[in-house]
Amino acid sequence: MSRPEETPVQPQERTSAGSLVERDPRVPPEQLVAELVPPPRFSGVRFASYVPAPDQPTQAEAVATMSGFGERVLAGGGGRGGGLAGLFKRRSAPQGPPGVYLDGGFGVGKTHLLSSLYHQVVTEGGRTAAYGTFVEYTNLVGALGFRQAVDALAPHDLVCIDEFELDDPGDTVLMSRLMRELVDRGVKLAATSNTLPGALGEGRFAAQDFQREIQALAGQFAVQRVDGEDYRHRGLPAAPAPLDDLAVERVATARPGATLDDFEAVVAHLARVHPSRYGAMVRDTAAVCLRRVGTVSDQMVGLRLVVLADRLYDRDIPVVASGVPFDALFTDELLHGGYRKKYLRAVSRLSALARDGAALA
């Protein structure tokens, strides 16, 4: 995928509020490992707090599947770096695939369930686990190197991978190899995605050329489907209409810790900051205020905004914006392309955050 040309952006107006475009965090590799935990929004969730929809039996099945898998992890141990002890553990561990995979649409509670599994194993079970999004693991490999990343993850009993997507052939080969090596060391795997593991990559690159790696990934998991509607929209009104610029600025200046930026400037800044650092960029932010949000047609820009939306949603950061509504953030061409599910998830999450932002205004 070619990199779009960056267009010059005029300096934005200064206010007393903070600014995202002035933030360029540097995250040391050891911090990347230490921060592999559920995001703040899901720090307190448990299986008991997940409420299955009565008309969606797969939701209750998913709770049973994930909690049962957690019991397997606690009963059989997990990665301890390999060696003879790890070999004997693997031979005596309960039978079944070394991983569980939740497949379902956005907003059905997959991240809630994955976080609950983490807490079952770590908070309640006293074992060790790593929790991160797909992009956080690929970035970990980039920061540490492949062998060092394996060594950093192998001591865990469980590795949780949220938002599992294969966007290019390199990631396909990388994650296939990483997960094989972790499984060989006795680590259990749990993942969520909007796509069945055997269909990862479809519509994005020549997936048929990488079927060996894709099928190797699929073979690591027992798949549990989770059906249902997006809980963020159940009984809620549509995303609020955008505000005018002055209203956005009033919220930004009145709320300590808020940021205020022009949307065009943020788009340009995201191209200069690696997506793995977006979470650090919005840390300790009380609200993100954006002036003149526009419709995006460029694929690379759109995918960066998807990652930003995920990190804002993880941290419960309200969004206050002027310009186009968030259901018009991406063009129809993007919404019907290979990354459709990612864009729809971003629209869903930004709409929920915009409702929170409307309360501030």
Image: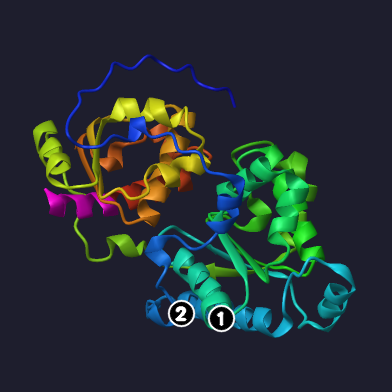
- Measuring 56% from the left and 58% from the top, which residue is drawn there? 34
Is any atom of residue 308 visible in this view?
Answer: yes
Numbered range of the magenta stretch: 352-361
- Residue 229 is marked as none
Helix, strand or loop: magenta stretch: helix
- Measuring 49% from the left and 30% from the top, which residue is drawn there? 300
- The three-letter amino acid code for the residue at tag 1 is Ser
- Give the left or right position of residue 173, taking residue 38 as reference: right
Rendered location of residue 191, percent (x, y): 59, 62
Picture quadrant of residue 323: top left
Is any atom of residue 176 visible in this view?
Answer: no
Position of the N terminus, as image quadrant, is top right
Q: Residues within 10 Å of mark 1 (few under 14, many from 20)?
A: some
Judge whether residue 358 is colored magenta. Answer: yes
Q: Which residue is mark 2?
A: 47
Above or below for 255 versus 269? below
Toward the viewer: 77 or 161? 77
Q: Which mark is first along the chain, 2 or 1? A: 2
Above or below for 221 versus 106? below
Judge whether residue 172 is colored magenta. Answer: no
Rendered location of residue 117, percent (x, y): 54, 74
Kindly check if marks 1 and 2 are in contact, taking CB atoms under 8 A apart as contact: yes
Mark 1 lies on a secondary structure that is: helix
Toward the viewer: 153 or 193? 153
- Measuring 41% from the left and 66% from the top, which residue is drawn there? 42
Picture quadrant of residue 161: bottom right
